[in-house]
Amino acid sequence: MADKIYRCEWCLKDQDYIDYHDNVWGKPEHDETKLFEFLNLEGAQAGLSWYTVLKKMDNYKKAFANWDVHKIAKFSDKKKSKLLENPGIIRNKLKVNAVVTNAQNYLKMREEGLTLNDYLWNFVDGQTINNKWEKMSQVPAQTPLSQQISKNLRKRGFKFIGPTIVYAYMQAIGMVDDHLISCISKSSFPK
């Protein structure tokens, strides 16, 4: 009889969720495009389930120029209005505008010589915070660190980056590993 494979229970809905859990969530990400993508996808999730966004990730990539910040930063009002007609993304004017604003503010960071990777990972000294939760009820929705990062991002002009969104973002990009200690993924990611 084979050993049972345990995963964090939140991902058991379907294979898309399992794939995201096994291959992305809690895994350290350093690619600038991916960091920008997930920052905005987490913002798109506000008030919704992550599953809703997960199912629309490919549509977001197409709608937002493969996450090319230079192109996004120049989106016109006409282009943003057209995006609000796109059923493949979450058609919320504030969220669509936030992606454009975030691209513009990201480019300002780059002009200062700061990458998103360096900026974010500096908050954790370049190391994943490896939590040791036994059950999902122990995993916080936000932390003092996510509050600090949220406040700092707000000062830089970023939108849809409240402390709960930032904590989910930290999980998505592997700044925090909140896989349960019984989860197969807890030991499978390089640290």
Image (tube, rainbow, N blue to C red):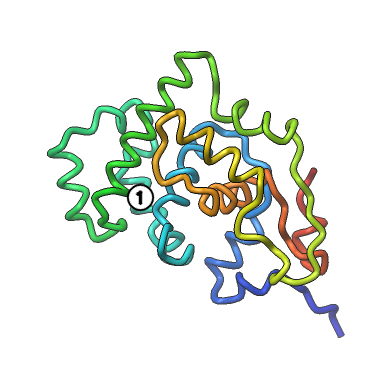
102 vs 118: above or below: below
Left or right, 61 with respect to 33, comes to left
Instruction: Give the x, y percent position of residue 18.
Output: 61, 67
The residue nearer to you, when weighing 68 against 40, is: 40
Q: Which residue is mark 1?
A: 60
Residue at 56 percent of width and 70 percent of height: 15
On the image, which quarter does residue 86 sit in? bottom left
Q: Quadrant of the N terminus?
A: bottom right
Label 1: which secondary element: helix
Across the whole image, how many numbered discs are drawn on residues?
A: 1
Instruction: Give the x, y percent position of residue 149.
Output: 58, 38
Residue at 66 percent of width and 60 percent of height: 140
Left or right, 123 with respect to 85, comes to right
Q: Quadrant of the C terminus?
A: top right
For the view shown, which residue lies furthest in the top direction? 112
Instruction: Give the x, y percent position of residue 125.
Output: 75, 31
For the view shown, which residue lies furthest in the bottom direction? 1
Left or right, 28 with respect to 147, comes to right
Amino acid carrying mark 1 in the image = Tyr
Residue at 75 percent of width and 72 percent of height: 135
110 vs 116: above or below: above
161 vs 138: above or below: above
